[in-house]
Amino acid sequence: MGFNSKINQKADEILNNKRLEALHNQDRMRSIVYSQFPRLQEIEQQLIIIGSETAKAVLNGGSAVEMTKKLAKESLALQSEARDILVSHGYKEDTLEPHFSCTKCNDTGRYDDEKGRTVLCDCLKKIRIDVACDELNKSSPLELSSFDNFSLDYYDMDIQEDKQVSPYERMSKVLAYCKKYARTFSLDSPSIMMRGATGLGKTHLSLAIANEVIQNGFGVIYVSAPMLLSTLEKSHFKYDYDTEEETINSLVTCDLLIIDDLGTEFQSSYSTSTIYNIFNSRLLNRKPTIMNTNLTLKDLEKSYSPRFVSRVMGNCAKIDFLGRDIRRPRPRRQ
């Protein structure tokens, strides 16, 4: 997965806090129950002693077989007595045990599989996904968008003569394509260039794709071109090359990079070369990229270069958006 160290660290902290909470609750419950039934605490102490004696017996080898059997029998009898005390007074058998949110790894995030390998638990993977979603929410200009709240009602059904298709028909196909892209996303998925005027839903559908792709366990970075270049330029011109390199590395290696509002950033030789290098590096590493722009091909060539446009257009699926600005209030179609 393409999650960065910040997301992984935060996820580890969340799971560790769950484990600490479970252990704290266990200590609190033991204090309550032991104050009511001192015999239970005596049983726990006896079980600890038996455990220690059993370990010694095992180390002594075959001559201690009978001793280990005897100790095991005593241990089972004490455990049965403890359960009887708890159940007879309305408690559950496992009242004195810690109740972890994940019984597979006991909230450690890792467990040993059948082959004895230490593997990442699904619960930690899920937390990483949730953290990544939160990070995406923070950086997006909208609340996290979904396919469910993308409405086609705002697109006209009248056919545009120059396009020979209605905005409604075109956007129905665009929506279907984006849904399939998100549902079947893999590192072999194509890059996408979304083109169209302001307010036609490019950002919304990009974020909807990101949301579903993250839910499927992939690492996604969403950023607007102005924010991206502003961040990188600050590091570059302050000679903070380590931070610049780390940021670019994250952009190049994440599973899916989404660059919104391409062409609206401040144009400079640095911004032009940086955008090209990021896209080209991802292309060479077989990493999909989604880019959105309000610019025409001619405008893109003026802002960047024919070489950049050729590279992008030759390696991206093109999606053209049609319609009027859907953010402007208008009567909904009946």
Image (cartoon, rainbow, N blue to C red):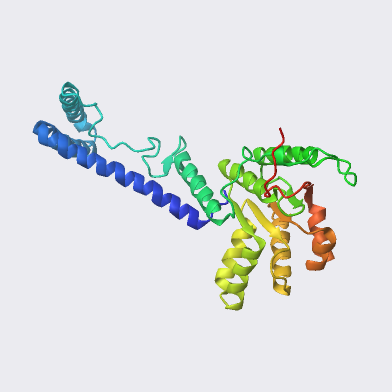
Depth check: 105 or 195 in front? Answer: 195
The part of the image, by quadrant, that contains residue 236 is: bottom right
**In screen coordinates, is 4 left or right of 230?**
left
Residue lying at 62% horizontally and 58% vertically, measured from the top left: 223
Q: Determine whether 35 is above or below 318 in the image.
A: above
Residue, far front? 331
> In the rendering, at what x and y percent does residue 245 appear?
59, 68
Residue lying at 16% horizontally and 37% vertically, measured from the top left: 32
**In screen coordinates, is 212 left or right of 302?**
left
Residue, far left? 38
> In the rendering, at what x and y percent does residue 267 appear?
72, 71
Q: Determine whether 34 is above or below 86 in the image.
A: below
> In the rendering, at what x and y percent does residue 321 appear?
77, 47
Depth check: 141 or 7 in front? Answer: 141
Q: Is residue 226 visible?
A: yes
Residue, far bottom? 238
How many numbered marks have been drawn onto this rendered protein structure? 0
**In screen coordinates, is 302 left or right of 216?**
right
The part of the image, by quadrant, that contains residue 30 is: top left
Depth check: 269 or 13 in front? Answer: 269
The quadrant in which the C terminus is found is top right
Q: Is residue 56 visible?
A: no
> In the rendering, at what x and y percent does residue 331 appear?
70, 41
Depth check: 167 or 253 in front? Answer: 167
